[in-house]
Image (tube, rainbow, N blue to C red):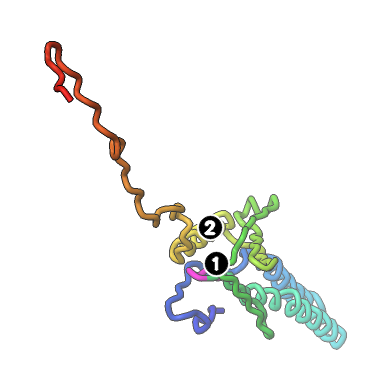
Amino acid sequence: MAFPDEILTEEEEVVLHLHPHAKAAVRPVLVLLTALAAVILVWVMLPPTTGGLIGVLVVGAIALFMGLTRGVWPLLVWRTTHYVLTDERILLQDGVIARERRDLPLNRVNDHAMSQSLLDRLLGSGTLKIDSIGDQVAVLASVPHAQRVQTLLYELIETDRELRGDGDDEEPGDDLPPEPVRQRDAGRRSPLPTPRPGSRRPRR
């Protein structure tokens, strides 16, 4: 399912749009295949009698329930979970029927950390924990290419700080006027000339 572009501002651009890692879809797909295989097996093995038809209906109802709750629903949750990085903020959205969205501006991010299990390291996924001003925490679970996403997040935060021009690069005292140059010999009397040998001093 596509991410709604109407929530973005006019000058805001999407840098990265992700769903959770595809490993979240493995178990629901296996459940759907198992349910379908069970129905086909019962249909073939049971005799075409009234009892056999009842058995097929019972197994079909159980397979349908398991397929919807453990197969289709997790797939919908996976596809409706969005991790979006823009040049201004981090957007988190999930929910199939009731939708929930969180916005986290880049200039309010204090820290971001990544954690990986052994399976995550093999698949290249991970969990990003983002701390912001005001003790707000955003958790991005099962992020694909977690290391690249964390590096990109760091670059976006640094670029946002440079564009806002916080003035951190200016050294104190740059705006002060230059001090006047003092002359060393200013105000001093010039020494008397030394009389040459043989010269007479003038009488007073």
Vertical arrangement, residue 186 with respect to residue 161, above or below: above
Q: Residue furthest left?
A: 199
Nearest-to-viewer mark from 1 and 2: 1
Answer few, some or many: residues within 10 Å of disc 2's Cα (few below 14, many 20 plus, some between 14 and 19): some
Q: Reply yes or no: does residue 191 show up in magenta.
A: no
Identify the mark at residue 154; answer none if there is no mark.
Answer: 2
Give coordinates of residue 26: x percent, y percent: 67, 65
Q: Give the secondary structure at mark 2.
A: helix
In this view, which residue lies farthest toward the front? 204
**Where residue 143 is drawn, which disc sits there?**
none
Q: Main secondary structure of the magenta part?
A: strand
Residue type at mark 1 is Leu
Quadrant housing residue 22: bottom right
Q: Is residue 61 above or below residue 189?
A: below
Q: Nearer the viewer, residue 107 or 183?
A: 183
Q: Earlier in the sequence, mark 1 or mark 2?
A: 1
Using the image as rendered, state which of residue 139 and residue 145 is in the foreground. 139
Residue at x-position 84% and y-position 83%: 58
**Residue labelled with disc 1:** 106
Amino acid at the residue labelled 2: Tyr
In this picture, residue 203 sits left or right of residue 129: left
Q: Residue furthest right?
A: 51
Residue drawn where x is 54% and y is 70% of the image: 89
The spot of residue 105 in percent (x, y) is 56, 70
Q: Position of residue 40 (x, y in %)?
A: 73, 76
| Magenta region | 84-88
